[in-house]
């Protein structure tokens, strides 16, 4: 049995070892709380048991625990130039024995380990059990959904995406090839972005990697797509037109997936 009240107290104990006023630390704490909420909500919408809902919430709370050491040691969120933060997270939890403070029950250890270790990988590893795979998918969706909230709400630098939220990119131009790639309904590589507006479109393309229709429903109920594009306030006419088209493409994709899922469940 997982005691989330105790787990949250232990989380406060853990982060007290770091400067929570440091912007990168602070933004990550906020993110982890939101991902925990998302994880629990997704699990609930999927009709999972209270036990699995609590497990999903705990994984969400702990998924980025490796980030704190990453920032302390390397002063960056970039795994490419420092360490794999998912791998560091399981090291903190299991090698450093913090997991027993967060959960006394060893029953969930393998699921927690696999979910956190896989949450930031390009693909989920093969050979997982059904329950391990389920929680890997939940945390990846919860993490991706929170990207939209973070871009809309946070003021600090989202270093993972290489842009400043406070930076005015309204006059940036969208690359035509990025627009064409978005239409193919598949994720876009940040490394292929030529402009900050391309990066924004790559963020929008996170809808294409979501595993569950309930995750798309969260995107829809928060009106994230339209709010996201409105916030960009595009001034370039070509970019403005294409971003409006992207909004339509994205919403059509979301509605189509949700409708298909509903029909399947009838």
Image (spheres, rainbow, N blue to C red):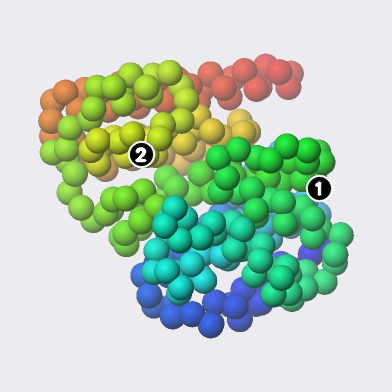
Q: Residues within 10 Å of mark 1 (few under 14, many from 20)?
A: few
Q: Which residue is mark 1?
A: 49
Q: Is 11 left or right of 188, judged from the image as shown?
A: right
115 sits to left or right of 207: right
Find out whether the residues at labels 2 and 1 contact each other: C-beta distance under 8 Å. Answer: no
Q: Position of residue 138 (x, y in %)?
A: 65, 44
Q: Is residue 251 above or below residue 142?
A: above
Residue 244 seen: no
Taking depth in this image into account, of 157 and 249 the one nearest to the observer is 157
Q: Residue at x 63, y 33 (%)?
A: 212
Q: Quadrant of the C terminus?
A: top right
Image coordinates for residue 58, horizontal then vertical, percent: 68, 60
Q: Is residue 104 something that shows in the picture? A: yes
User: Which residue in the protein does label 2 denote?
Assistant: 191
Q: Which residue shows up at 65% across the image and 55% down it?
A: 116
- Decide which of 252, 160 is in the foreground and name it: 160
Between 13 and 97, the residue placed more toward the observer is 97
The N terminus: image quadrant: bottom right
Tell me: residue 201, above or below residue 179.
Answer: below
Position of residue 76 measured from the top left corner of the image (x, y, whole percent):
39, 64
Name the element at disc 1: loop
Q: In which quadrant of the rendered view does residue 170 lie? A: top left
> Who's the residue at 69% across and 68% down the image?
93
Crowding at dot 2, Cα within 10 Å, few <14 / some 14-19 / many 20+, comes out as: few
User: Of residues 182 and 252, which is closer to you in this image?
Assistant: 182
Residue 148 lies, in percent from the top left, at 42, 45
The local secondary structure at tag 2 comes to helix
Residue 80 located left or right of residue 162: right
């Amino acid at each position: 049995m997982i005691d989330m009240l105790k787990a949250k107290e232990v989380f406060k104990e853990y982060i007290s070892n770091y400067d929570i006023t440091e912007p990168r630390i602070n933004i990550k704490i906020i993110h982890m709380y939101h991902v925990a909420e998302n994880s629990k909500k997704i699990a609930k919408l999927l009709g999972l048991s209270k036990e699995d809902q609590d497990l999903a919430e705990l994984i969400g709370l702990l998924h980025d625990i490796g980030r704190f050491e990453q920032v302390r040691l390397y002063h960056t969120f970039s795994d490419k130039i420092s360490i794999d933060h998912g791998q560091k997270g399981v090291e903190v939890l299991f090698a450093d024995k913090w997991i027993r403070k967060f959960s006394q029950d060893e029953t969930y250890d393998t699921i927690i380990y696999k979910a956190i270790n896989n949450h930031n990988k390009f693909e989920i590893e093969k050979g997982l059990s059904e329950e391990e795979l389920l929680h890997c998918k939940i945390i990846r969706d919860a993490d991706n959904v929170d990207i939209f909230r973070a871009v809309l709400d946070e003021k600090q630098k989202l270093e993972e995406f290489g842009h400043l939220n406070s930076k005015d990119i309204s006059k940036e131009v969208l690359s035509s090839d990025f627009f064409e790639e978005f239409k193919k309904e598949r994720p876009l590589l940040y490394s292929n972005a030529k402009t900050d507006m391309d990066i924004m479109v790559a963020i929008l393309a996170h809808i294409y990697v979501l595993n569950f229709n309930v995750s798309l429903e969260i995107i829809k109920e928060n009106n994230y797509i339209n709010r996201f594009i409105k916030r960009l306030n595009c001034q370039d006419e070509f970019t403005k037109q294409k971003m409006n088209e992207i909004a339509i493409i994205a919403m059509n994709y979301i509605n189509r997936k949700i409708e298909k899922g509903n029909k399947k469940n009838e």
